[in-house]
Structures are given as structure tokens and as C-alpha cells.
Amino acid sequence: MKRWMMILLLLWALPGWAQEAPEKDKATHDALRAMKDQCVEALNKGDFEAVMALCDEEIVFTPMDSRLSHGKSEVKAYLDSKLQGENKAVEGFSTEITVDRLTTLYGDTFGVATGTSVSHYKLIGGKNLDVENRWTATVVKKGDQWLLASFQSGADLFENPLLAAAKKSAAVLGIAAGLAGLLLGVVLGRMSKR
């Protein structure tokens, strides 16, 4: 019985241990948390120059629409195309990021982080859209600074607000078409009796 109690206590404590950085990696994880916080704050302010300062020159960026961007200039051009100019798709944007666990470190200069986010979009025309994403980021250390080397995010293909809106529109159109057909049938029926 004591043996089983020890095993249960060990299993119960594991999730807490998984979030605690070993002492030798504590400074690294603190630096990575600070970088994440700076990036989210800059994104939410629309300060893309500050975001770019946290990115490696050769960053690889794949957002939800799967448009691949290589390098800072392509990433900046992508963000500008969506959020600025006369053809912009989004009026405003903010995000809340949650990490799954501590960054998985591969040596002293490379790591992979994963998590989820909720992105809030204010679309052209005034509609608001909240999208839940899953993301993966690769970080590299150059000199004494951690930089974002790659970032990819995606929404659930089967459960997302765009799909829900499309389903709702299809239902409304179906009901409207049914009512129009019924009305047309009644009108034609009365006309044929005359």
C-alpha cells in the first residue's frame, strides 16, 4: 500500500516539476519569457518594428493563411499587407498567448516552444472575430540575445469562427430559399386556379 501511495504522490507532483526550470536553465527561461512578453506587447500595440527587433534576420513565418514568409522584410510586408493600406483586411488586431510548458532546449542556443493563442481581429466593416490558434516557435540565441527563428500558427480546420459563420449563413440562405419557394408555390397555385 505504501508503495502505491508513493507512486501516486510522484505522479501527482510531476506536472509541477515539469514547469520548473532546472537551476542551470533558469536564466534562459527567464530571458525567453521576457522575449515572449515583449513580442506580445509590441504586437498588441501594432509596433511591428519592435516585433522585428526580436526576430532573426532569416525568420521563417507561417501564419494561419499558410502564406510562407522568409526573412524580416517578407514578414513585415505580409503584416503591412494585412493591417495597413487601402487593401488591408484587418482594422485592428490583438492576441493573448499561452505556453504549453517551458521551452524545450537543445543545447545553449536553440529551443522550441509551443502553445495556444486567442487572436482578436477587428475586420474591415466593423465585425469582430476571435480565433483560437495552436502555435510553434523556434528560438535561437545569437550573441547574448534570444531571437525568434520561426513561427507557425494554425486554427482548427473543423471548429473555427469562419466555418461557424459559413454554416450559419448556409442555414439562413436555406431557410430563405425554402420560404421563397413556398411563397412562389402559393402564388403559382392561386394563379393556376383562376
Image (cartoon, rainbow, N blue to C red):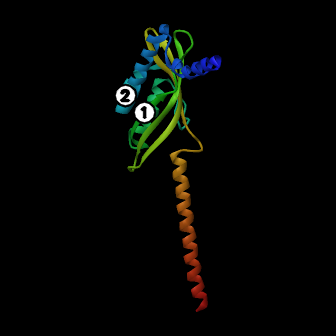
**Pointers 2 and 1 in contact (C-beta within 8 Å):** no
- SS class, disc 1: strand
Residue 50: horizontal and vertical position, in percent? 37, 24
* Image: 63 above or below 160: above
Dot 2, how many residues are within 10 Å of its Cα: few (below 14), some (14-19), or many (20+)? some
User: Does residue 69 appear in this view?
Assistant: no
Front in this rendered view, residue 71 or 155: 155
Res 10 seen here:
yes
6 and 127: which one is in front?
Answer: 6
Numbered disc 2: secondary structure:
helix
Quadrant holding the C terminus: bottom right
* Residue density around tag 1, few if under 14, some if 14–19, many if 20 or more, within 10 Å: few
Q: How far across and how far down the image is residue 45, in percent? A: 34, 32
Q: Which residue in the rendered view is the most extreme toward the bottom? A: 194
Amino acid on which disc 1 is placed: Glu
Q: Image quadrant of residue 18?
A: top right
Residue 147, horizontal then vertical, whole percent: 46, 17
- In the rendered image, the vertical position of residue 101 relative to residue 143, given as above or below: below
Q: Which residue is mark 2?
A: 41
For marks 2 and 1 on the same chain, the one whose residue lies earlier in the sequence: 2
Q: Amino acid at mark 2?
A: Glu
Question: What residue sits 44% from the left and 45% below the top?
Answer: 129
The quadrant holding residue 105 is top right
The residue to which callout 1 is attached is 96
Distance, label 2 to label 1, CA atoms, is 10 Å
Residue at the far front in the pictured view? 1
Q: Please tell me how many numbered marks the rendered image carries.
A: 2
38 vs 17, left or right, is: left
Q: Position of residue 162 (x, y in %)?
A: 52, 47
Picture layout, residue 94 above or below residue 113 = below
Residue at (52, 26) in percent of width and height: 100
